[in-house]
Amino acid sequence: MSPRTTSATRRTSAPTATVLTVAAPLAVYVLTLFALYSFLVRAVDSFHLALLAGTAALLVLPVMLASIGAPMAVCLVVLMLAPLVPVIGYETLGYRHMAIAVQRTLARGQQAIG
């Protein structure tokens, strides 16, 4: 391998690795939130899967941008937008959706008790 190839590889892999060090823990956090919600209401629905898919897209996009040589600042700004997907989803439609899911779960619990 020539020194140029090694240098070019390092230039593209270092930013990608840096973006991954932020994206990976954020992905674990987001997956944990969605898993916790699904566990607590004992349901998986299409609305939350759509939110999860949108969040995943905004977690993968900055890594892809970094791998093609986009500036680190751009990658981190795009990555910063990933948590906004569930926040905006919750504020627009999710709070009503969640209230229905919680009521359904509570009703199932009451049926199990009595």
Image (cartoon, rainbow, N blue to C red):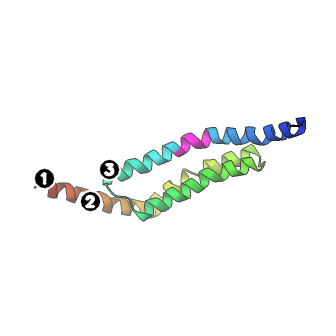
Position in image of residue 32 (x %, y %):
44, 45
Mark 2–mark 1 CB contact (< 8 Å): no
- Amino acid type, residue under disc 2 in the picture: Gln
Mark 2–mark 3 CB contact (< 8 Å): no
| Front disc: 2 or 3 | 3
Position in image of residue 91 (x %, y %):
46, 59
Q: Find the magenta span and give its range.
A: 22-27
Label 1 Cα neighbours within 10 Å, binned few <14 / some 14-19 / many ≥20: few
**How many numbered callouts?**
3
**Which residue is located at x 71 percent, y 42 percent?**
16
Residue holding disc 1: 113
- Amino acid type, residue under disc 1 in the picture: Ile
| Front disc: 2 or 1 | 1
Lower position in the chain sequence, tag 2 or tag 1: 2
Q: Which structural element holds mark 1?
A: helix
**Which residue is located at x 42 percent, y 61 percent?**
94
The quadrant the C terminus occupies is bottom left
Location of residue 76 by image quarter? top right
- Amino acid type, residue under disc 3 in the picture: Leu
Position in image of residue 92 (x %, y %):
47, 63
**Which residue is located at x 58 percent, y 51 percent?**
82
Residue holding disc 3: 40
Q: Is residue 8 left or right of residue 105?
A: right
Let me know if residue 31 is in the magenta part.
no
Residue holding disc 2: 103
**Which residue is located at x 31 percent, y 54 percent?**
41
The residue lying furthest to the left in this view is 114
Lower position in the chain sequence, tag 2 or tag 3: 3
Location of residue 4 by image quarter? top right
Let me know if residue 26 is in the magenta part.
yes
